[in-house]
Amino acid sequence: MANALIRPMSGEYEEYLRDESRSVGKAESISFPRTTEDVSSILKEMYEKKIPATVQGSRTGLAAAAVPYEGHAMNLSRMDKVLSCRQDEQTGTFYFTLQPGVLLSELRKMISGKRFQTADWTEEAKAAYTAFCRAPEQFFTPDPTETSASLGGMVNCNASGARSFHYGSVRGYINGLKVVLMDGETLTLRRGEQFAQEREGTLRTDSGKEIHFTLPSYQMPHTKNASGYYAEDNMDLIDLFIGSDGTLGVTCEIEIRLLPLPQIIWGVTAFFDQEEKALRYVRLIRGEQLEGCDRFDIHPVSAEFFNGDALEILRREKRENSAFAQIHDIPQQYETAIYVELHGDTEEDMTNRLLELGKAIQQAGGKEEDTWVARSQTDLDRLMFFRHAIPECVNMLIDQRKKKNKEITKLGTDMAVPDAALEETMAMYNTMLKERGLQSAIWGHVGNNHLHVNILPNDSEEYRKGKELYNDWAAKITAKGGAVSAEHGVGKLKAGFLKVMYGEKHIGEMRQLKKAFDPQNLLNRGNLFAPEEENK
């Protein structure tokens, strides 16, 4: 290759052919750019030679978006610098500009410790940083379970996490992007500056080239959603790139918005002996009016669900694996758990909301004594460990089974439905899993009616049944007005589901939109569009 940044693919780079989806791809070359200019030069060469390019971050995704089908793999993990800081003069809000390879875990450490490398910053940025260091503690609200996720990956799939119930997804905290298109051109986007005219859009690259395009005509579901291109009349065009699965351009710079960290954070895990009671509790803490119950004004930041099968897997691991010893014992009568997080600034307010939670538990049919409350950081860490331990246990179980049968992987949904469909959707999951005799564990962001149903196949036949079940669910969830992907993105694994959700006409509109930015269809092939759709 003429470009010194491009290396032939060899055995030492084999790990870059896979991501957390457990899918494995292939590539003929790989690169590790460090700057926007590096990315531009690499893509320009690929474009001229018509070589497909797949972009990667930390490869924590679950939809195989970072798995290359062919051609070139561009890994952005070495683009890991924070480039600048600024403070809005009117609101006092702090913004940081960073490269896409910055990890969420590292960003959190830098923000909480107020330890950034500022040597290369402008004097203006250093002055803003000085103000940041003197200000009350800040935080970046999106909190996907996997904190080793890169910020570029989070932007590409519009990541969210538990706290999105209150704060929303990453989209709401992205104020600017610098994107490199497949032909090497750069595009600068700032929130509030470039808008569509109804469904027609025009963007100008930094060199002055105009790109005209039409947004898809579909109406997005009124649920938590990370399924395909964001499209609304007169929309801010920065939102088109957030959640686009990297199919329109390579995100090279990201300006994020911070919020002041609440003074007090408490966590509460309530256990119920019946799933129906737990779901009733969810509706009460959301502020819904139920017959025979008070209306509560609790405003939880998150509401997380764990079903009986998930709790049983955790009980077993606690008995057999010392790594989970710090988790409190989970009595056998605990059938379902709901974790709630509260943010506030005064002890009085938080105490009142905690009392309201206790009343909601009782009116839902639970008992206050069947509750874990965390008011100290140590106790909160234990509850957070409990929340993260269940997915970890399931991944360990699947990895054990995969050693016996390489075809087996965890099959995990990422679907969300409108509020009215919560109970019927849970009943659908439970009934269809039981009918097919499949082991599973269900957890997730129940406040947004967004649950991860994890089928745990024992053999190839169960794996086949599980995949068929997911296809069936995609159609049923769509019919309920839901989304086939709520936070993980579509990637390659869910492209078929996206077609079920939007239909052939709208998938065609999406392809035409992509063609405006990537006319040769070279960037992140397979993401959003099933392979058979690629050349249409």
Image (cartoon, rainbow, N blue to C red):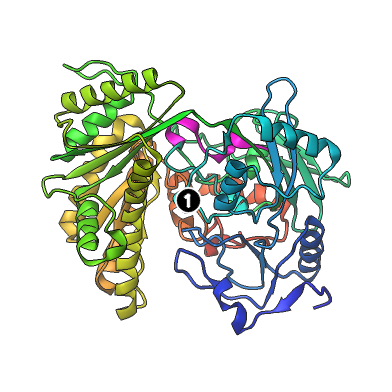
Identify the residue at horizontal 72%, vertical 36% (top origin). 201
Identify the residue at horizontal 42%, vertical 41% (top origin). 162
Count of number-bearing discs = 1
Residue 355, how many percent across, how many down? 26, 22
Identify the residue at horizontal 58%, vertical 33% (top origin). 137
Q: Secondary structure at mark 1?
A: loop
Q: Amino acid at mark 1?
A: His
Question: Residue furthest toward the bottom?
Answer: 11
Residue 528 in which image quadrant: bottom right
Quarter of the image containing the N terminus? bottom right
Q: What secondary structure do most residues of the magenta stretch adopt?
A: helix
Residue 205 in which image quadrant: top right
Q: Look at mark 1 in the image and give the residue it sits on.
A: 488
Q: Residues within 10 Å of mark 1 (few under 14, many from 20)?
A: many
Q: Left or right of 254: which side holds 40?
A: right
Q: Left or right of 50: which side holds 172?
A: left
Please indicate, yes or no, whether residue 231 appears anywhere in the rendered image.
no
User: Which residues are the magenta region?
Assistant: 164-175
Q: Is residue 170 magenta?
A: yes
Q: Is residue 416 magenta?
A: no
- Say above or below: 477 vs 494: above
Question: Residue furthest toward the right?
Answer: 207
Work out whether residue 363 or residue 135 is closer to the camera in this orientation and state it.
135
Residue 501, how many percent across, how many down? 44, 45
Quarter of the image containing the C terminus? bottom right
